[in-house]
Image: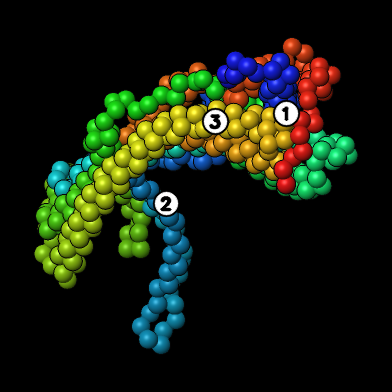
Amino acid sequence: MKFAPNALPGAIRTRLAIAATLLAPLLAMVPAAPAGAADLLQVYRDAQSNDAQFASARSQLLATREKLPQGRAGLLPQIVGTAGASRTKLDQTASLPIGGSPSASGTRFFNNNNWQLQLSQPLFRWDRWETYKQGELAAMAGEVTFHQAELDLITRAAQAYFDVLAAQDNLYLARAQKKAIGEQLEQAKRNFEVGTATIVDSNDAQARYDLATSTEIAAQSDLEIRRATLQQVTGKPVDELMGLRSEAPIPGPQPPDVNAWAAQAETSNPQVNLAGYNLETAQRETNKAKAGHLPSVDLVASYGFNNQTGSATQAISTHYNASQIGVQLTMPIFSGGQIQSRVRETIALADKAASDLEFARRTAAQTARQTYSGVSNGLAQVKALEAAERSAQSAVESNQLGYEVGVRINIDVLNAEAQLFSTRRDLARARYDTIMNGLRLKASTGVLQEADVVQINTLLTSVPGSMYKLPVPAQAGGKAPAKAAAAADRRGVRRDGGTPRS
């Protein structure tokens, strides 16, 4: 801040007092993060271990990997064993011709035990080969789906993290604004008591104070909701988080070429890769349907044993071993048109999968362009809001000084303070949104990884008040800044330099 060469010492002290008064609420409201405050990397790793969605994706990956051995099983030998045992009771009666009486009767028992092994080895079954290749595609698609879950986990954890920081900022700024308005209200009441201000100033300040109280309550509620959302991701409560340094250089997109990012998204976006696997799977389903017209050839072999102790016609026991080997050919001749219909169905589904792939490519490119624009425009917005914050700070100081000398009314000071706190909220939100758009940009191309979380982690700090560029108090809980205005009064700063205009 520059002072006029002919500025009076009292005016200089007034400006210093104003600055101290504006800083005091923020110093009082921004808590010092303890040494155990969680950072983004810790939150991400907690989410890896505890997030229910990610755990579900991990289990789904393990299940999908089994598609490969299931498909391969259709090409391998199939061996079936059977065994049986039975006991037969036979009641026999020998009779004379009609009218005669029975001549003999008796009961016989005989047993039958058998077992058999059957082997079948496919020699040519085109449908099973296509099923095996589909199993490979399903396993690869499962890996891509899990990679998408990893990208989603990073963005969800980061979004929840920065949402909590933004909610904390809103609460701290709401409390600071309330405190500043309260001090302005007390000043207006004192000026009214001594006759240097009207009751309008007090009423305006009281109305703003009541509104600030409502804003504080809403901010507190929002913070609790955001913390609950973060806990849902991490699986554990997180009381304190490290904040973003105000001077932290937010990384821009590299390379700084939107077309390069869009082109990469069209080829490496997980949804594009997944759609590509779906298309190839649909094409192989068509091949499998066409295989219904082809013959199947199997190698078949069997070996069995049978032991029988008599039968209904003879009492002699028999047993034998039987072995068999051969090639079995099965040729479809007519299936009622079912195969042709199935082929037409799969061709239509393959065309649909091709359209889905093209849609996925276009969507990925559009997402990359949007997030790239979000990063580049966000960086420009951050710079503009930083300049706006400095201007709003100067406006508050100027209006406060004008109120002191009687050329501004209380509502002017309140409006300037409201603009300052609103700008600070917008600036904090713009920083968080720009960082998140950077993560989403990398996610849209499939290159987002833990190293990017580590990079963002270097932008965080546990120093209290860093976001607002505030000095750390010499003593925790010290009240010296809040008493700066009173000290300025004792040093002779004028508070009755004229009658405020109404």
Q: Between residues 283 and 479, which one lies in front from this camera angle?
A: 479
Q: Residue furthest bottom?
A: 99
Residue type at tag 1: Pro
Q: Residue at x 43, y 60 (%)?
A: 88
Nearest to viewer (mark 1 / mark 2): 1
Q: Residue at 73%, 28% (x, y): give it.
A: 25
The answer to whether any part of residue 332 appears in the image is: yes
The residue at which mark 2 appears reads as: 85
Q: Is disc 1 surrounded by few (<14), some (14 to 19) or many (20+) residues within 10 Å? A: many
Comes first in the chain, label 3 or label 1: 1
For mark 1, give the secondary structure: helix
Specify how the rendered protein is coloured: rainbow
User: In this view of the protein, which residue sits in the foreground, 108 or 416?
Assistant: 416
Residue closer to the observer: 467 or 208: 208
| Horizontal side, residue 383 vs residue 490: left or right | left
- Disc 1 and disc 2: Cα gap in Å? 93 Å
Asked whether the viewer can see residue 48, the reply is no
Q: Quadrant of residue 364?
A: top left
Q: Report helix, strand or loop for mark 3.
A: helix
Residue at which label 1 appears? 25
Identify the residue under disc 3.
391
Within 10 Å of disc 2 (Cα), the crowding (few <14, some 14-19, many 20+) is: few
Which label's residue is closer to the chain start, 3 or 2? 2
Q: Could you tell me the amino acid type at mark 2?
A: Ala
